[in-house]
Amino acid sequence: MLSQIPIKLDKVSERELDMEILRAAVIAELDAVNLYEQLAASTQNKQLKRVLLEVAREEKTHVGEFQALLLKIDEEQVKELEKGKEEVEELTQE
């Protein structure tokens, strides 16, 4: 994993542990997406590029899986995600 887990999991309360594990998993998957897409952009080999982009797409699915589970157990995250969506809608209205 290119990034570091942002907190020490052994210092987290038991109640928060699963949410932090899921956030760390999302970070790891996003790191993988970025890596594979950057590598794909760097190669001229069409087969390699195709495989790297397919693997990156699969990692995006994993992000969605972890995020879906996080949203099931973290009510605050759900509220803040909706708030962020509303703010973007306001800022991007023409």
Image (tube, rainbow, N blue to C red):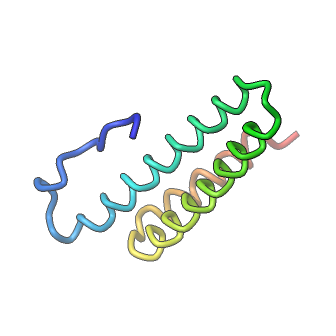
Tell me where residue 35 appears, x and y as whole percent.
56, 35
Indicate left or right for 91 with 82 as reference: right
70, above or below 90, in the image? below
Q: Nearer the viewer, residue 57 or 73?
A: 57
Is residue 25 positioned above or below 3 on the image?
below
Q: Position of residue 83 (x, y in %)?
A: 57, 55
Q: Outermost residue toward the right?
A: 94
Tally of numbered tags? 0
92 vs 42, nearest the viewer: 42
Q: Is residue 24 above or below residue 33?
A: below
Residue furthest out toward the left? 11
In the rendered view, tell whether residue 53 sits above or below residue 10: above
Q: Nearer the viewer, residue 80 or 30?
A: 30
Question: Where residue 58 sits in the image (x, y, percent)?
Answer: 64, 57
What residue appears at the point 40 percent right and 34 percent down from the top-left corner? 2
Q: Quadrant of residue 37?
A: top right
Question: Which residue: 41% across, 56% down?
Answer: 25
Which x, y percent locates residue 87? Answer: 64, 47
Report the residue at 21% width, 71% height from top: 15
Q: Is residue 93 left or right of residue 4?
A: right
* Quarter where residue 18 is shown: bottom left
Residue 44 as seen in the image, left or right of residue 22:
right
User: Quarter holding the N terminus?
Assistant: top left
User: Residue lying furthest bottom in this view?
Assistant: 72
Q: Which residue is found at the position 78% from the left and 30% from the top? A: 45
Quadrant of the drawing holding the C terminus: top right
